[in-house]
Image (cartoon, grey):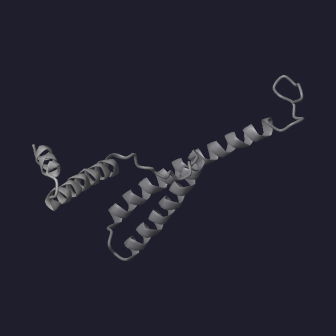
């Protein structure tokens, strides 16, 4: 309906209103198309580097140690009671122990993998690589 009105106005020769109406009409169409493209265009997401499980565990270990230091500071400042401090400290120490055990396990597995993949080292059957 609106486009028919613009087309009728454009069909009348010698009127500047028709030309202005056509310019506005096509400008609106161009703006709408650009807006639709901007809204629905795929977004490029930069991905960070992929972390290994070992790198994640080292980060987690540092966070746990920092939390233990903060907990100790808050206890000494009188913000925590004895029971709360002991419960929180015990749970954080257990979490730290689990993280350290997993780090140790992954490092041993990586060390075994490196040792078995060295050239000239015999494999399980005694054959040299």
What residue is shown at x 88% (from left), y 25% (from top)?
127
What residue is shown at x 33% (from left), y 48% (from top)?
37
What residue is shown at x 81% (from left), y 25% (from top)?
124
In this picture, residue 111 sits left or right of residue 38: right
In this picture, residue 43 sits left or right of residue 125: left
What residue is shown at x 45% (from left), y 50% (from top)?
44
In this picture, residue 17 sits left or right of residue 59: left
Q: Nearer the viewer, residue 100 or 13?
A: 13
Above or below, comparing residue 27 to residue 69 in the picture: above
Q: Nearer the viewer, residue 83 or 53?
A: 53
Q: Nearer the viewer, residue 54 or 94?
A: 54
Tell me where residue 107 appears, x and y as whole percent: 67, 46
Q: Quadrant of residue 31?
A: bottom left
Q: Nearer the viewer, residue 123 or 73?
A: 123
Q: Which residue is most to the top?
A: 125
Tell me where residue 117 appears, x and y as whole percent: 79, 36
Above or below, comparing residue 118 to residue 49 in the picture: above
């Amino acid at each position: 309906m609106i486009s028919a009105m613009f087309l009728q106005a454009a069909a009348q020769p010698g009127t500047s209103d028709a030309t202005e109406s056509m310019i506005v009409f096509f400008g609106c169409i161009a703006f709408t198309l650009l807006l639709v493209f901007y809204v629905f265009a795929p977004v490029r997401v930069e991905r960070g580097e992929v972390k290994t499980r070992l790198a994640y565990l080292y980060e987690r270990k540092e966070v746990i140690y920092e939390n233990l230091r903060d907990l100790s500071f808050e206890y000494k400042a009188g913000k925590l009671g004895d029971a709360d401090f002991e419960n929180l400290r015990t749970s954080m120490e257990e979490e730290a122990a689990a993280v350290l055990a997993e780090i140790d396990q992954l490092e041993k597995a990586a060390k075994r993998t490196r040792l078995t993949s060295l050239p000239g080292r015999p494999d399980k059957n005694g054959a040299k690589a």
